[in-house]
Amino acid sequence: MSDGPAEPSTVPPTGPTPPGPVLPAGAPTTGAAPPGSMPSGAPAPWPAPAGGAEGEPRQRLHPLSPVLHGAKSLVVVIAGLSWSTLSRVGFGWFAAMVAVLALGATVLSVVSWYNTGYHVVGRELRVYEGLLWRRTRAIPLERLQAVEVVRPLLAQLTGLAELRLEVVGGGKTEAPLAYLGVADAARLRERLLALAGRVAQAPAPEHAGAVVLPGAAAPTAAAPGRPLHAVRNQSLLISQLLTPQAFLLPFGVAFVVVQFLTAGSWSFVAVASTLTAMAGVLLQPVRRVLDDWNFRLARDGGTLRVHNGLLETRAQTVPLARVQTVRATWPLLWRMKGWLRLRLEVAGYSVAEADDRNRPDRLLPVGDLPTATMIVAEVLPGVRLDALALSPPPTRTRWLHPLGRRAFGAGLFDEVFVTRSGRVTRQVVIVPYARIQSVRVVQGPVQRRLGLASVHADTAGGSGATAQDRDLAEAWALAADLTTRAHQARNPT
């Protein structure tokens, strides 16, 4: 489901004072804005757009942006040349090739930076790109869901940040502005969200300037809003050691060593292949540690503020009104410590991203039940995770689930529909009635013989909750009840 268009904002933007009148087309940039209208150290503005369009002068990205883009291109160039090229041409020619290609990449980055700009026109953010083929993207702010401040490692070292926009119905993250100064990125983020009606804007510019300092180790010196929870990095490390990949790795290493000792084969290809396989196995736990390092969660009005990351820090704003589901998961090896993790499904965020790290689904990477109960109550008021009494499926489902029939369950509560599933990895899914888009009753061939059916409550995010293997009459009654409650929640009298 989508929110309706927000009313035009009457709150003045934070950060620099509004620019002066728009210059006519072709006018010089000098004097385009009154003195003091731009913050100290901000990129110089472009002239106003031709045709007298309303809005501030176009802004360029930070002058160091070409350096960061050139550095990333240099890594790609060196990886592409490979060691075989070095052995064929020698170190001198190899260094010359790298220098020429790096220079070319830097020149292209400078040209791209010179022809890239952005500004706010009315209730749109417009981004201009291209030299030979010019492209203008207009992003309606009423469709804006969230703005991320992302800081890759090179950006952290240079005091810069990247701005990424999430738009309703977008197939991917829109119009990334890479790179801006950290303070400029924070001010622009708050301004865009305020114009979109997602968050209340800071009343005074000095507060916005105090949130983020250039060159800081994170996008914010202190997370805005009311702090909810900070995950201990030690718990995060232990949780990833209690995964099947890390738990079984020593056995795999011992097996490979025994094979090498008995076969007497220590070829370079065999060793390299083994190390590559081990790195692939450990990639997911290591990436989770890097992504969730220093995880902090805060509540700011109707939004959640999430800050996380080590090599690439992220500051995300999650609108609570867009939360579709909350999922609590108990992995098998975590149960000995009583740990679980919480995930969100948020409407309006792209689902076609190849890298799912861009999605704001992290609510609690690892924690105990009391902590999870507190956080769920913040997201879904009145819902207690530790007091959800769910009814199991009928006894005859033992033919389908002989070892774990009671691992499944479902229940209707005042504001939410809750399901439970999983024998090895347990999962509880909580769906507010107002977020249910459709209800389906599905019956497979085996279920037909047993008089069972599954009830699916679908959400706008594409998943939802499933009450598996209910009695057929109960399934139809449950579907009718869910449809009525969803209609009433969306259309309160």
Image: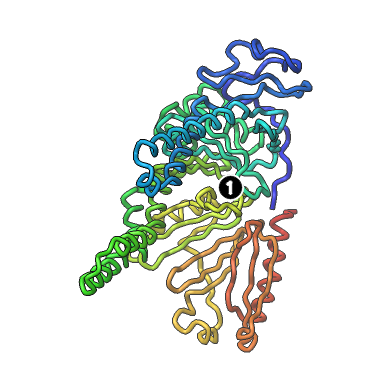
Q: Residue at x 54, y 34 (%)?
A: 178
- Label 1 sits on a secondary structure element that is helix
Tell me residue 179's x, y (percent): 52, 32
Q: Residue at x 66, y 36 (%)?
A: 196
User: As displayed, is residue 375 above or below residue 335?
Assistant: above
User: As displayed, is residue 416 above or below residue 319?
Assistant: below
User: As displayed, is residue 378 above or below residue 315?
Assistant: below
Q: Residue at x 56, y 45 (%)?
A: 318
Q: Amino acid at mark 1?
A: Leu
The residue pinned by badge 1 equals: 320
Tell me residue 426's x, y (percent): 46, 68
Residue 354 vs residue 436, the one in the foreground: 354
In the image, taking residue 20 as reference, residue 255 lies left or right, namely left
> What residue occupies the far right of the structure in this picture?
51
Residue 70 vs residue 244, the one in the foreground: 70
Tell me residue 31's x, y (percent): 65, 10
The answer to which quarter of the image holds residue 470 is bottom right
Q: Residues within 10 Å of mark 1 (few under 14, many from 20)?
A: some
